[in-house]
Image (spheres, grey):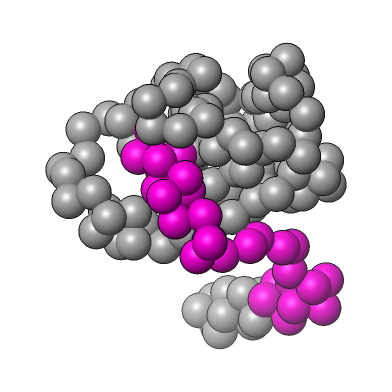
Amino acid sequence: MYYVGIDISNDTFTATMLADPNQILFYGKEFNNTLTGFIQLDTLLSEKSEKDDHVLILESTGVYGEQLCTYFYRANYRIYTEPPQYVRRAFRLKRKSDKVDSKMIAEYGYRYSDQLHTWEPRNSIYEEVISILNNRELFVKQR
């Protein structure tokens, strides 16, 4: 099993892949947070092993990871999102960089693989309700 820790931000994401904490296959590779970046990471992962052997772990940081998660979900990868405080608490280290964070997330996935939270896309009706509520809020402010 290979654990891919992904530290995501608005414009980029950084990934680290390991088999165990002492066997790192790649460390701190940075990609654009766009379809092109997703394809590049998918290609890199495909070169290493089969899709069934990968576990992708992200911190649940809101909207920044939605497109990435959706892309890899549709590509039949296993995706897990974890609350950032769980990852920080497990290591008790101050964050230093995106590279270090991605390694910590991958290692967290390795250590706590039996407790990870599976990511699945939201139901389309849920998305519609959110959109309607956001529009309503804008109209109220404009009025």
Seen from the viewer's position, the closer of residues 125 and 93 is: 93
| Quadrant of image for the N terminus | top right
Query: Residue 64's x, y, as percent?
Result: 54, 48
Q: Residue at x 55, y 35 (%)?
A: 4
Q: Is residue 140 visible?
A: yes
- Verify whether residue 131 appears in magenta: yes
Left or right: 47, with 142 as reference point: right
Seen from the viewer's position, the closer of residues 55 and 22 is: 22
Query: Residue 27's x, y, as percent?
Result: 43, 20
- Verify whether residue 65 appears in magenta: no
Q: Is residue 71 visible?
A: no
In the figure, 21 relative to 36: above or below? below
In the figure, 37 relative to 114: above or below? above
Left or right: 101, with 4 as reference point: left
The range drawn in magenta is 103-132
Q: Main secondary structure of the magenta part?
A: helix
| Quadrant of image for the C terminus | bottom right
Q: Residue 121 falls in which quadrant of the image?
A: bottom right
In the figure, 87 relative to 95: above or below? below
Seen from the viewer's position, the closer of residues 134 and 77 is: 77
